Image (cartoon, rainbow, N blue to C red):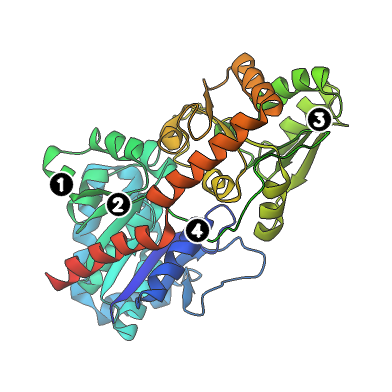
Amino acid sequence: MLKIAYILTTYPCRSETFIERQIKALQESGFDITIFAAGYNGTNGPSQSKAFYRPNFSLFETFRFAIRHPLSLLRLLILFVKFLFACPREATVIACNMHTIFYFSSIVERLNINHIHSGFLSWPACIGLAVAKLSRKKFSISAHSRDIFVEHGAANLKIKHSMFTVCCTSDGLEYLKTKLLKQYHSKLYLNYHGIELSRGKVNNCRCNPSPLITATARLVEKKGFNVLIKSFGSVVNKYPSAKLIIAGSGPESNNLNHLIKENHLEKNIKMLGWVEHRRLMKLLSDSDILVVPSIVDSNGDRDGIPNIILEAFSVGTPVIASCVGGITEAVKDNHTGLLVAPSNTAQLLEAILKLIEDKVMSAKLSENAYELLKYHFDLQKNAQQLAKLFMDTNDA
């Protein structure tokens, strides 16, 4: 049995349910997974029995480990110097987390873990590479969106030492190539996220007298919810009983609430805050349209393929989304959904009205979307692709 340490920033994390699904699928394939994370922001604590978290800093414990393992300390110092030349900010991560690295390494040794896998290219890859060096284990990375487009510091160093690095979109993979030396391109693999394909017959032709539109994500700039709110005011002008539900929490919450009041849309737009996944799926099933109005934010961050798009595909809810980031790899314009230019309120309004008024088109988009879901985003198939990389790496 292959024992893998998954290094994550937070676990469980409300906005990273794809990680939970991937880990579960790997476990069902026979892998023994242990979680290492800085902390968690779930509501009920860790969902894995084997989850270890960054300890409180202890100078005594740090020195004690260093004295007991002088060669490990030397390897860590050499790695620190390499990070210092590659990206001083990432070197600071190593320096500030020495106690965490020592602690995680001791658990890897105690549990006889075979492979270190970092769930993101950012903090987890710094810590994961350090743990792999200290414990002399094989190392790999998963890269997603913000960690590719914004937090890719020392990417060459991290990927140089990885056995492989998987990206969850072609868009992210191609962007990452622009940050890497060509000799490391061969270490990159495309591995889409996936979801369970277990839906029964779905009524794709909803006939709600009051159109219900849903948008859900963390309330951050790149999600573009301000654009949706502005467009929705014009939807209400034509359909006064139309409803928009925004599910999610985050730093943009106050700004969005202010925008709703400013546009006198309090009766038509409801902000739910964070919603438990089962309730969210029920909301999605009841909705006429899912809107994903993503933009590229001021830091250059953008979406990969938001999992809510795949979940909408799975229950037959038609999708309107911005043509940004990896979204176009799932939403094919006029085939699996409708695409609009980011921040274009006129195009977004036109697309919403089109799907409200054309139920035949909505049904066709939903049927095509489910076929694409089966072909590219089957959780079991995609998890097996990742499992094969782990097995091939550790058989070598």
Q: Position of residue 82 (x, y in %)?
A: 20, 51
Instruction: Give how far apart the Cα atoms at labels 3 and 1 are.
Output: 50 Å
Binning the other alpha carbons within 10 Å of mark 4 as few (below 14), some (14 to 19) or many (20 upward) gives some
- Quarter of the N terminus within the rendering: bottom left
Look at label 2 and name its amino acid. Val
Look at label 1 and name its amino acid. Ser
Q: Are marks 2 and 4 in contact (CB under 8 Å)?
A: no
* Mark nearer the viewer, 4 or 3: 4
Question: Quadrant location of residue 151?
Answer: top left
Residue 296 visible at all: yes
Q: Give the label on residue 186, or none.
A: 1
Residue found at x 86% / y 31% = 266
Q: Is residue 262 above or below residue 27?
A: above
Between 102 and 203, which is closer to the camera in this rendering? 203
* Mark nearer the viewer, 2 or 4: 4
Instruction: Give how far apart the Cα atoms at labels 1 and 2 are.
Output: 11 Å
Q: Are marks 3 and 1 in contact (CB under 8 Å)?
A: no
Look at label 4 and name its amino acid. Leu
The mark nearer the N terminus, 3 or 1, is 1
Q: Position of residue 113 (x, y in %)?
A: 30, 78
Circle 2 sits on which residue?
Answer: 166
Q: Is residue 373 above or below residue 291?
A: below
Q: Give the label on residue 242, or none.
A: 3
